[in-house]
Image (cartoon, coloured by chain):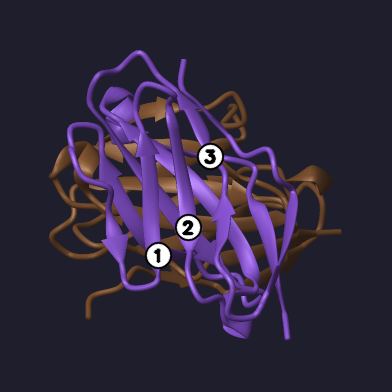
Chain colours: A brown, B purple
């Protein structure tokens, strides 16, 4: 069964450092997303990406964040200068082109710890 | 603006009994999808069930059913014959066409199944 894969599964970094989280969405999917979940809390939308550009971003997704699809398979989230409050689980997700009916497929998450 | 509300932070249920997890939503978009996801303690997001805004019948998937009341904007999840393995966090979610078909999540309900 096809799946969304994320690397790394866990990253520890110092405040102020740059972090890149990587995702490989399901190959025939068209819409890609990043979500964030601070421990035990709600799953927060960060950004949606379609046709090589951002469709929508939340207020959390400020200038410190960027996304890229550098090739046909990878989808990355970059945090330029991490803050303590960026510590969270980051989920990548993708869906096919069936609009609002399509199930969102999640990766297993990348846990980011900022010290 | 779209919104998902889950008013039950935690629920307890006896093994083998049924339980209902509440979810209300708000959107001005006539086309939307409603989803429930389970998040066990291991952290992955597991898709459970989907209901489309134009679906006339309530969705069912095994022991899961979605009680969809469109006029009340509610989409409650019913789990029948609860099992110990059902203990987890449950998130109600909604996808709309706006924002690249982004999906937004409620705050979640933590379900505890007692033996």
The residue at the far right in this view is: A115
Q: Quarter holding the C terminus of chain A?
A: bottom right
Q: Of the residues under marks 3 and 2, which one precedes in the sequence? A: 3
Q: Residue at x 47, y 53 (%)?
A: B77
Q: Which residue is mark 3?
A: B23
| Picture quadrant where residue A54 is located | top left
Subunit that carries the residue with mark 3 = B
Give me the disc on residue B95.
none
Q: Nearer the viewer, residue A57 or B31?
A: B31
Q: Residue at x 49, y 71 (%)?
A: A108
Q: Which residue is mark 2?
A: B78
| Picture quadrant where residue B72 is located | top left
Subunit that carries the residue with mark 1 = B
Structural distance between the alpha carbons of marks 3 and 1: 14 Å
Q: Nearer the viewer, residue A62 or B46?
A: B46
Q: Quarter holding the N terminus of chain A?
A: bottom left
Q: Residue at x 28, y 45 (%)?
A: B51
| Picture quadrant where residue B110 is located | bottom right
Q: Which residue is mark 1?
A: B64
Structural distance between the alpha carbons of marks 3 and 2: 11 Å
**B40 above or below A88?**
below
Residues at badges 2 and 1 in contact (C-beta under 8 Å)? yes
Is disc 3 in the same subunit as disc 1?
A: yes
């Amino acid at each position: 069964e096809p799946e969304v894969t994320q690397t790394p599964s866990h990253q520890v970094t110092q405040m102020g450092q740059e972090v890149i989280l990587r995702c490989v969405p399901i190959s025939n999917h068209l819409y890609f997303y990043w979500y964030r979940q601070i421990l035990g809390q709600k799953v927060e939308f960060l950004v949606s990406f379609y046709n090589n550009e951002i469709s929508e971003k939340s207020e959390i997704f400020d200038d410190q964040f960027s996304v890229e699809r550098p090739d046909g398979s990878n989808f990355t989230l970059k945090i330029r200068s991490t803050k303590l409050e960026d510590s969270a689980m980051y989920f990548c997700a993708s869906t096919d082109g069936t609009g609002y009916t399509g199930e969102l497929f999640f990766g297993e998450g990348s846990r980011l710890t900022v010290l | 603006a779209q919104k998902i509300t889950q008013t039950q932070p935690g629920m307890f249920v006896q093994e083998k009994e049924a339980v209902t997890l509440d979810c209300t939503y708000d959107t001005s978009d006539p086309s939307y999808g409603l989803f429930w996801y389970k998040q066990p303690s291991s952290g992955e997001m597991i898709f459970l069930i989907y209901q489309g805004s134009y679906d006339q019948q309530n969705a069912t998937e095994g022991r899961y059913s979605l009680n969809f009341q469109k006029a009340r904007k509610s989409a409650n999840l019913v789990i029948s014959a609860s099992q110990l393995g059902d203990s987890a966090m449950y998130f109600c979610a909604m996808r709309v066409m706006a924002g690249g078909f982004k999906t937004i999540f409620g705050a979640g309900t933590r379900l505890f199944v007692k033996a």
